Amino acid sequence: MITNFETNKVFIAKGLASKPYLEATAHLLGYLHHYGFEWSVLPDTDSPFYIWARDYMPIQVSKDKFVRFNYSPDYLKDSPEYKPDTSTILSTLGLQVIDSDIIIDGGNIISCGDKVIMTDKIFRENPHYDHDVLINTLSQLLEAIVVLIPEDRYDEYGHADGMVRFMGNGRVLLNNYRDFDKAMRKKLLAALTPHFDITELHYRVYTNNSWAYINFLHVGQHIFVPMLKGKLAEIAFRQIAEAYPQCKCHQIWDCEYIVREGGALNCSTWNILVDLPKKEKSKELPK
């Protein structure tokens, strides 16, 4: 699978440029422009309900292979306004995809190259599949070994991207479960240790939003960490930067409003690997 280290273009929903998200969006896009990254606005995503691009856009497996899963999570059962018309988006982008009836959000797929991490919520959301058949089908579609971790019972979305992130070379970064849920930490270590070397975040304190820091945007050799109010923001940023010495890490201001809606920078972006044009043109921020 394509990993974040390989990606070079970032897409956002146009709704992310509306108030109250505009300041954080402008700061992020300013960084992307400064470092020469391509970025674009997804078509037909004007609604502020459409900001969670990671979850509804397809998964890039290889340069020209994308898989679109069924975006029908349980938490949106009574909220259809959060579901954009992805067929229209993909048609406008000229992107061909492989469709799957498996229900899974992009935020629950952590690409680690030849492995992919996701929570066991996939079983609960796909009861029509035999467990072994589901895992084998996902492995074939994603061309990777599926590594399952337990779903965080305090996370209504059941996503892996607020729990663990890929660091490269068989290593993963685990959120600060040692600070607030030792039983969960034990389960996660048991699931991950056979496959990865693990680095743990450790803040010595817990807040309801500690998951947001590990939900950073990682594109190429750059990491963009959401900045929230309080001393924990600096502690988290420093530890993430230490975990990724090969990357340049940046803090993105004013992410409180995005986080209040239930996601952070990984959730609200979609980054992929594309052929870059020979000359990159500067872009204005979306209005």
Image (spheres, rainbow, N blue to C red):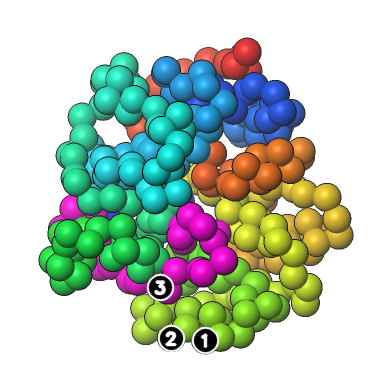
Tell me which numbered mark, 1 or 3, is placed earlier along the sequence: 3
For image coordinates 33% across by 44% down, the residue present is: 72
Bin the neighbour count of mark 2 within 10 Å (Cα to Cα): few under 14, some 14-19, many 20 and up: few
Bin the neighbour count of mark 1 within 10 Å (Cα to Cα): few under 14, some 14-19, many 20 and up: few
Does dot 3 land on a helix, a strand or a loop? Answer: strand
Camera-side residue: 259 or 26? Answer: 259
Q: Are dots 1 and 2 in contact, CB under 8 Å?
A: yes
For image coordinates 19% across by 70% down, the residue present is: 131
Per the picture, the main secondary structure of the magenta-coloured stretch is loop
Does dot 2 land on a helix, a strand or a loop? Answer: helix
Query: Would residue 48 be found to the left or right of residue 110 on screen?
Result: right
Q: Which residues are magenta?
A: 139-162
Distance from Cα at disc 3 to Cα at disc 2: 9 Å
Amino acid type, residue under disc 2 in the picture:
Ala
**Which residue is labeled 3 in the image?**
149
Q: Does residue 149 belong to the magenta stretch?
A: yes
Amino acid type, residue under disc 1 in the picture:
Lys
**Which residue is labeled 2 in the image?**
190
**Which residue is labeled 1 in the image?**
186
Give the percent coordinates (x, y) of residue 1: 30, 54
Does dot 1 land on a helix, a strand or a loop? Answer: helix
Inspect this view and state whether residue 41 appears.
no
For image coordinates 76% across by 40% down, the residue present is: 253
Give the percent coordinates (x, y) of residue 162: 55, 59
For image coordinates 77% across by 77% down, the residue present is: 204
